[in-house]
Image (tube, rainbow, N blue to C red):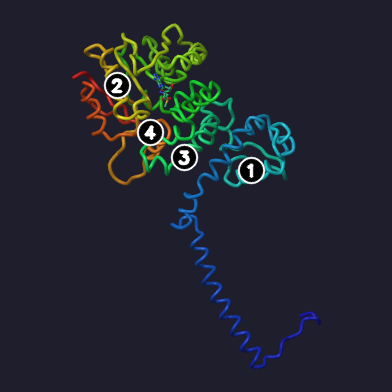
Amino acid sequence: MSKNQRQTPRTPATKFASLQKKIQQAKTKTNVDKKREEMSETSPSRQLDQMITGYWTSQTIYAAAKFGIADLLKDGSRSVEQLAEASSTNADALYRVLRALASIGIFAESRPKEFSLTPLAEPLRSDVEGSKRALALMSGDEQFQAWSEIVYSVQTGNTAFEKVFDKPIFDYLSENPEKARIFDAAMTGIHGRETGDILNAYDFSGIEVLADLGGGNGSNITSILQQHPTMKGVLFDLPHVVERAQEQIEAAGVSARCQLIGGNFFESVPQGADAYLMRHIIHDWDDEKSLAILRNCHAAMPADGRLLVVESVIPPGNQPFAGKFLDLVMLLIPGGKERTAAEYRTLFNEAGFELARIVPTNTELSIVEGVKQ
Ligand SMILES: C[S@@+](CC[C@H](N)C(=O)[O-])C[C@H]1O[C@@H](n2cnc3c(N)ncnc32)[C@H](O)[C@@H]1O
C-alpha cells in the first residue's frame, strides 16, 4: 500500500456503510443480469426490437446502394473523404452510414475512416452477377413509400402503391424508364437464382416452343434455352420491357431461337407455343385479372399444351415461409396475392385448366402445372 492510501478505521458507521454498499452491489448485479438477459440477442424482447426496427438496416443499405458505394470500392479501399467526393455526399453523414453497415458485416472500416468491400457488400456492386443493387434501390424507394401506407391497405384492401403514386405500378413503370430498368434488374436480383432450381426440378425436355409470359428482361428464358439447345423460346412482355430485353437476349447468344413479342396479356398472348410459363406473374393480380390471363393462355394453347405457373405456393401452418411476406408485397404494391394449392386449383378450374401437379423446387417456389380440361 502506498503512503497516500490510508486504511479506513472500522467503526460501526463504516461497517454499516460497507454492508449497505454490498446490498446495493447485489441489487445492481441482479438488475445487470436482468438487463443482460433482456439484451441477449435471442431474448423475445430483443428479437422483437430487431423486427420492429428492421427498416433501419434496409434503408441504410438503400442509401449505400443509391450512392453506389460498393461500385466505388471495387478496386480497393478508399477513404470516406474520397467516397463522399465521388458520390456527392456529406463526408460525416456517409461515415456514419458506413460505420453502421460495417457493424453488421456490410463493408469494413479497414483503417480509420477508410472502407473496403466485404462478402456481404460485394453483391451491392452493379457489375457482378446476381447483383442486389437494383433490388436495394427498388425496395428502398417506391416500395418503402408504399409500405409506409400498410395501414391504408389493411383497412381497405386496396393497394398502397396506388395511394402513394396515383397509378398502378406497371403504369408507373411504363412512364418512368429508369425506374423500369431498375425494376427489371431487381427481378433478376431477387428471382435470378430461381431459374437453376426450376431447371433442376422440372423436366423441360420435349417442349419445342416455350413462351415466357411477363418474362421481363429475359434472364429466365435465356437460361432455359441455353440448357435446351433445340428448344425455341418466346419472350412476351409489355412493349417497353421487351424492347430493353433485346440486348440481353443477343448477349446470351440465343436471339436466333428466341422471338421477342411486346403485348398485353389481358388482351391476348402469342399462339404457337406448346408450353406457357409464367414466373411471378399470377401473384401480381387479383382473381379476376388472373383469370383473364389464364383464359387468354387457354385460348392460345394447343389441346395438349402445358401451363407452368411458377409461384410460392403457401403451405398451411405457422412455419416460416418467405412467401407469406411476399404476399404482403403483393397486397401493397401490384394488388395481387400469393395463393395456396387449393386456391390455384380453383383458379385453374375456372379458367378451364386442370391442376395436374405441383412440382416443388429447392427454393420456396413450385411449378404449378396445368393441362386443358
Ligand atoms: C413480377 S415481374 C416478373 C418478371 C419475371 N417473370 C421474373 O420472374 O423475374 C412481372 C412482369 O410482368 C410484366 N407485365 C405486367 N403487366 C403486363 C401485361 N399487361 N402484359 C404483359 N406483361 C406484363 C411486367 O412488365 C414484368 O416484367
In the rendered image, which residue does mark 4 sit on?
363
In the rendered image, which residue does mark 1 sit on?
97
- In 3D space, how far apart are the residues under numbered discs 3 and 2 (Cα atoms)? 28 Å
* Eye-nearest disc, 3 or 4: 3
First-in-chain label (3 vs 4): 3
Amino acid type of the residue that numbered disc 2 sits on in the rendered structure:
Ala
Amino acid type of the residue that numbered disc 4 sits on in the rendered structure:
Thr
In the rendered image, which residue does mark 2 sit on?
292
First-in-chain label (1 vs 2): 1
Q: Which residue extends farthest left?
A: 373
Q: Viewer-proximal residue, 158 or 44?
A: 158
Amino acid type of the residue that numbered disc 1 sits on in the rendered structure:
Val
Callouts 3 and 1 close, C-beta under 8 Å: no
Q: Is residue 9 above or below residue 103?
A: below
Ligand 1 quarter of the rendering: top left
Q: Residue at x 45, y 33 (%)?
A: 161
Q: Viewer-proximal residue, 268 or 50?
A: 268
- In 3D space, how far apart are the residues under numbered discs 3 and 1 (Cα atoms)? 22 Å
Q: Residues within 10 Å of mark 4 (few under 14, many from 20)?
A: few
- Residue 206: quarter of image: top left
* Eye-nearest disc, 4 or 1: 1
Secondary structure state at the residue bearing disc 3: helix
Q: Is residue 364 left or right of residue 128?
A: left
Q: Is residue 128 left or right of residue 288?
A: right
Callouts 3 and 4 close, C-beta under 8 Å: no
First-in-chain label (3 vs 2): 3
**Whole-percent x and y of residue 309?**
32, 24
First-in-chain label (2 vs 4): 2
